[in-house]
Amino acid sequence: MKHLDIESLKEISRRCRGDILKMTTLANSGHPGGSMSSIDLLVTLYAFANVDPKDPWNEDRDRIVVSHGHISPAVYATLAAYGFVNREDVIAGFRHPASIFEGHITRGIPGVEWTTGNLGQGLSAGVGFALAAKFKKKNYHVYVVMSDGESAKGQVQEARRTARKYKLDNLTVLVDYNDIQISGHAHEVMYVDIKAEFEAAGWKTIEIDGHDHEQILSALRIAKNDGAPTAIIARTVIGKGVDFMEDKPDYHGKALTREELDKALKMLGIENDLHVYEEKRKLLPIKAHEKVKLYYEVKINTGTPRVYEKGTDNRSALGRAIADLAVLNDNVVAVDCDLKSSVKLDFLDKERPDRLVEVGVQEHNAAALAGALSADGLITFFADFGVFGIDETFNQHRLNAINNTNLKVVVTHCGIDVGEDGKTHHGLNYVGAPLAWYGFKVIVPADPNQTDRVVRYVASQYGNYVIAVGRSKLEPIRRIDGTLYFDENYVFEYGKMDILREGEDGAIYSMGSAVPEALRAWELLRERGLNFTVVNVPCPYDLDEKVLKAFSNFVVVVEDHNVYNGLGSLIAQKLFELGILPRKFIKVGLEEFPVSGDAKYLFEIYGLKAEKIVERILKEY
Amino acid sequence: MKHLDIESLKEISRRCRGDILKMTTLANSGHPGGSMSSIDLLVTLYAFANVDPKDPWNEDRDRIVVSHGHISPAVYATLAAYGFVNREDVIAGFRHPASIFEGHITRGIPGVEWTTGNLGQGLSAGVGFALAAKFKKKNYHVYVVMSDGESAKGQVQEARRTARKYKLDNLTVLVDYNDIQISGHAHEVMYVDIKAEFEAAGWKTIEIDGHDHEQILSALRIAKNDGAPTAIIARTVIGKGVDFMEDKPDYHGKALTREELDKALKMLGIENDLHVYEEKRKLLPIKAHEKVKLYYEVKINTGTPRVYEKGTDNRSALGRAIADLAVLNDNVVAVDCDLKSSVKLDFLDKERPDRLVEVGVQEHNAAALAGALSADGLITFFADFGVFGIDETFNQHRLNAINNTNLKVVVTHCGIDVGEDGKTHHGLNYVGAPLAWYGFKVIVPADPNQTDRVVRYVASQYGNYVIAVGRSKLEPIRRIDGTLYFDENYVFEYGKMDILREGEDGAIYSMGSAVPEALRAWELLRERGLNFTVVNVPCPYDLDEKVLKAFSNFVVVVEDHNVYNGLGSLIAQKLFELGILPRKFIKVGLEEFPVSGDAKYLFEIYGLKAEKIVERILKEY
């Protein structure tokens, strides 16, 4: 039921304006002002784009990302007008917990490609989808609708540059330039010369009246075929169509009262039938709606594991495994932020340079576009140092988690194992921070062999994972008899702890680059007549209760991580939950920002060195 | 010992080049390439600027921020050449744990205004310092030296726009445009049209040869007096001065070998006396150097507390208290990100509009510039929604913490108390996330009266604080006799828990917007014959052990926060540490991304409503 004749578009827009006002007034919440300024753009775009309400997830569909997700009333009204969703459900359910029509639009609602709401991230997602089309050799076009206020976010400029670099001629942006944001006129709050900035980033621009359907259509036609990423800068008026709302910041985030609604609907020539929806809303149960989640079946050949007999850094094992996967599979890509040789994506760059996305020092954009790539059928690795891939991109990954992406965040240079680069570069929150990204799983492998298996494992599972490794060379972990612990028969099982040594006098739990010190501590303790157990914990979020119960007498946790939010903290809570109070519980980790220096010195200074661990154990034994 | 004649500058630069190479080779670590391309800029700038090695922290000094902190060898060499620091200490100590000359430059070393290393944040700090000068009516000039590679960070564009908006004619940027970053030539890795982007943000630009001291000096003179923020874009060559290093990405982050050093020093006409420093380095102890921390004495009149007898939202109490402080004191400022009316900085805007910095939707820049403002003598409040002030700006605050700033992060709209805006806007990590920012303290006040006192308290203390509040209106907390709990005589003590109700059958610990539900639960339980204690915990990081010990039989923790990293998690760990296993321990909080809806519905759905809390208690009692 899509119409490209101007009169129909006008008529649909008029009716959508009524729906916007009804749903916000009924919910007594939401953002009518910007919805009214964006609606002509949306109505025209959804008519023009190759999207089909009867087959909303067709692989060849155009992707439409609405970045200023607070104009959800306009999006829902448009989707309802074209039959993607049920109009009554929208108006009655808007912002009610039992309704999928949340305050900000949600990926998975037919016609909605990306959950937005945290401003400035939508263009990055659009770049991700446009890149995905290129990787998949698909012809779909990607449209990003965004606001002028959010154009101030630096991430937007990062995304623009990336579009130029990758010649994303399949990407069109529509800017709703209503010059109003919460605090007043956008040009006064924080002036952004949107046209100049797009052009400085190499885009074509077209300026139009964003309420003139003919101009919008014409611009969309030009933008689609001009061989470059193009921004359509649409001058609009907030609250357009209702005189007392026009150009008023007040209506940015405030619904009309019943009286105002009545007045406004009259002005629009629309009947006020709010009571119909009101009755329907009353029937909604007070419970959370079922989750709207998209995912796809992961098809991948994980290849033959590599077995490392000699010492190597986990980074290289990580990089090699990613390269192996990309050689075997066309649906594997990796995103880099100018750290290729450090995070070891140089292996990938050598073997499949066409599968490496290099975006430079633009981590926010990188994390968000990687999320979108991963959501659009590509098994995506986002590689970075711990501080950038976790701390700097905290909220981007939170939004990826909300979007139920299939992202593999692989961070290297975690912990003080980084050494001389010092505290700005010591990523100490790779376990603690992702607790905020519900659904993300964290894996901290102990040696190159485990790292190799973990990479192949996460690639085969739909979902978001962090793999965190250090910087230094590590010897493969061996059993007492000298054979490899993670040998060619080893299969990684998520949540399994690895009992590396067994003894009855106490237990050292550890992960990642701290494990070699735990093993050396075991040796030193044995020399002093104490037989300890050493447990490797690669999955700190899903602790093996059986192992914890078995080895809970004298417990030591050693981690190259912030001691306040890491493995020790999680083990303490789990033991507490299990009702187990060990005779002694010692946490070794970082209690302050560390200094800069050779990692081996730092391990000594901060108590992670085997001798220091043993000293502490003996003191408290 | 500063020289402005060109020959001296050339000679100093030559000698600094030698020192750069010596210190990196001796440390076998560090970034010589960029140091060699920046050195002529630095040597000229430190000579030109009003900085005095004999009085390095003079209030009227010019501020120099070096944003690409990895060129620390160049900075240290320059500082040594001008007598700010001891040259032998620098060369011998570089990147050694016992030395203050860390891998990335550290605020507090004479001549170093800001710890950098996480790229793209330095210009925001510079904007902060330049704003501070305006607030203090000082004439000092601010210089930011930065790299071309980091210019890709979106935050840089945010900072540029802010400089224009506030007409920061006291701000000059020097861009070391060597066109090399780790992965290769910057224009290939991610092209940034630096000149066009500065100009799009309203800056003046000057292009020069960054190795020509005369051009550098001349540009500095023009920039200082041209009445606008100005960028000096200096074309440079990485590794400049040593032929085999020039224009080679390899030397970005790799020290020369001993043989290469020998060759390079010969080329520079400098004697190789590395053995002298080598001997000195060997004598350094393996321990962390003493912390280099700057702070200032806080002078503030905290005024007369406001007493709220009627219900109001904590946000308003927060905003009023900030306005009160600003009326009484000239050294109080607040930074807003287009949420003035929501975070209630509109009170400040009304009473002291000259103390409100409005930067629009540019949170990364806002957080960093707020940190710098706070470090430069201004008691600074950074106000934002929880998701933006905590989650989006996670790494900016981590860097503020490293810089030992005096920042008060006041976040509103925390928790599902936000309601209809939904999961993208539910800030659920205001306790969990700042655990990563060592030294930050978090305070979650329970009602408007406590909020008022907390704001006045944090303003009077040097240091970094988070104050987190919800969105809804809250009734002032009262004792059983109906009098105000936090009355006119109440004084906030950091770390103190508030026993709101006392009973022997169990204890509910809570904070912030969950406290009213805990109090209602107490009532409902009493109706059923159970006498519970209700404890308000405004300081989740510093738990009162005495109270915990006294009320640890049947423990319930209720929080409008992520259940995995919040108050419940911290109380569990503390009880475990104290060796206390309660008969029952129940954590109520958010276990997943919540849906969107009226807060009162969400409290019911996610178990935070009094009736639901009681239901759960009775089930497990």
Image (cartoon, coloured by chain):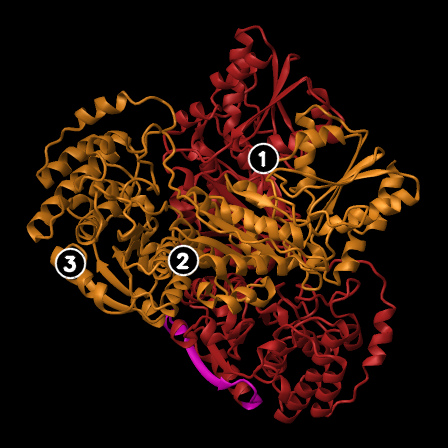
Chain colours: A red, B orange
Q: Which residue position holds label 3? A: B217
Q: Which residue position holds label 1? A: A566
A411 vs A506: above or below: below
SS type, badge 2: loop
Instruction: Name which quarter of the figure residue A283 lies in.
Output: bottom right
Residue A606 drawn at (x, y percent): 46, 26
Q: What residue is at 32 percent from the left and 44 percent from the top? A: B70
SS type, badge 1: loop
The CA span between labels 3 and 2 is 28 Å
Q: Sort mark 3 into few (<14), some (14-19) or many (20+) by Cα contacts within 10 Å.
A: some
Q: B514 and B26: which one is in front?
A: B514
Q: Callout 3: residue from which chain?
A: B
Q: A117 and B400: which one is in front?
A: B400
Q: Sort mark 2 into few (<14), some (14-19) or many (20+) by Cα contacts within 10 Å.
A: many
Q: How many marks?
A: 3
Q: Callout 2: residue from which chain?
A: B
Along the polypeptide, which appears first: circle 3 or circle 2? 2
Question: Is residue B610 visible in this depiction of the protein?
Answer: yes
Report the magenta residues as a range. A198-214
The amino acid marked with disc number 3 is: Leu
Q: What residue is at 76 percent from the left and 49 percent from the top? A: B483
The amino acid marked with disc number 1 is: Gly
Question: Which numbered tag is attached to residue B153?
Answer: 2
